[in-house]
Amino acid sequence: MENNQFKQFKISRGMWVFFAKLSLLSPPIMTVLAIYLWDYVTPIDIFVFVLMYVLSGLGITMGFHRYFVHRGFKCKPWLQTVLGFLGAMAVQGTLLHWCAIHRQHHQASDKEGDPHSPHVGADHTLSSKIRTFWRGHMGWIFEGNPHDFERYIPDLMSDPAVVKLSSHYPLALLMGLLIPGVITGLWTLTFTGFLMGVLWGGFVRVFAFQHVTYAINSVCHVFGRRSYDTSDHSKNNWVFGILAHGEGWHNNHHAFPYSARHGLKWWQVDLSYYVIFLFEKLGVVWNVKLPRFGYDPTRNAEIKK
Ligand SMILES: [Zn+2]
Ligand SMILES: [Zn+2]
């Protein structure tokens, strides 16, 4: 591991908590402001909200999660770069941090060592269940920079292109706030229009998708149905299947972690897989991994190349 890679990956606990607070607390504060200014909202503001929600969301679900963490498919270098930038625009930490934490989650799902389980430490009292649910949702982020987790991502850290992509986090974050503002600013030709775009396509959208993503760790490990007898508490939850671009089919995902497809039944809406499927047809994505049906819990999942 090169020294500079290590340095950019490691940040102090104080810095981690500071950035976590800044990136998690400013979106809800700005969302309150956006609601206060509701009378000034125009259709173009809602358009940039939806556009950025879908695109930055795909950066997380199709990019950070299914591509970088689980290697569910291969793609052209330009698409890797686009997915890395879009995912960073969702303001959920750098690519390397995100992937390390998520691999840690799969390794210890709902057991000691899972960075965000809503079950670990819970007893039968309601207050304890609420406390661990909150910890699984967002509380874990404020606990500080998890140590020694670079060991979960040796493949990513040894790839200079991925390390460089991850280091562009502040730039991508800024672009995610400014791009919707530029669109609404050019559309309305006013500075107020620009600010409303930053507010709705930037801050409010970040707030919405942060909680939708974190709900996969909290809600989808508590509420929903199970199709597979996995060793954790993962559930399939249709609400987050829709809101999180297919990630709500979380029990399917824990059963077949490497599968690029999470919605395994025709009615299990999975926007991320539809996009992967389309890109595969266009020739920019290949080696798409899918589960081979006939689940064996002792072997986790069978993967078809
Ligand atoms: Zn999970
Ligand atoms: Zn996963």
Image: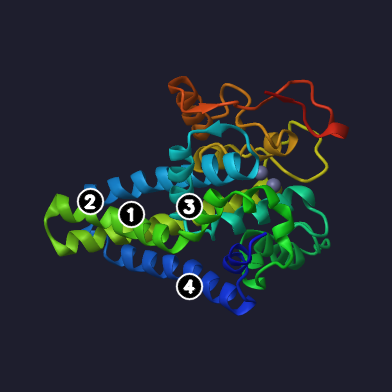
Depth order, front residue of 131/216: 216
Q: Nearer the viewer, mark 2 or mark 3?
A: 2
x 29%, y 54%: residue = 179
Residue 270 horizontal/vertical position (percent):
53, 32
- Dividing the image into 4 quarters, which one contains the N terminus? bottom right
Residue 50 in which image quadrant: top left
Measured from the top left, where is residue 251 in percent x and y? 70, 38
The residue carrying mark 3 is 209
Residue contact at pointers 2 and 1, CB within 8 angstroms: yes
Query: Closer to the observer: label 4 or label 3?
Result: 4
Q: Name the residue under label 1.
A: 201
How far across and how far down the image is residue 40, in percent? 21, 60
Residue 137, percent from left and from top:
63, 59
**Residue bearing mark 4:** 22
Quadrant of the drawing holding the C terminus: top right
Q: Give the residue at mark 2.
A: 183
Is tag 2's residue or tag 4's residue first in the polypeptide sequence? 4
| Gap in angstroms between the C-alphas marked 2 and 3 | 20 Å
Asked if the residues shown at circle 2 and circle 3 are in contact, with their CB atoms under 8 angstroms apart, the answer is no
At label 3, the amino acid type is: Phe
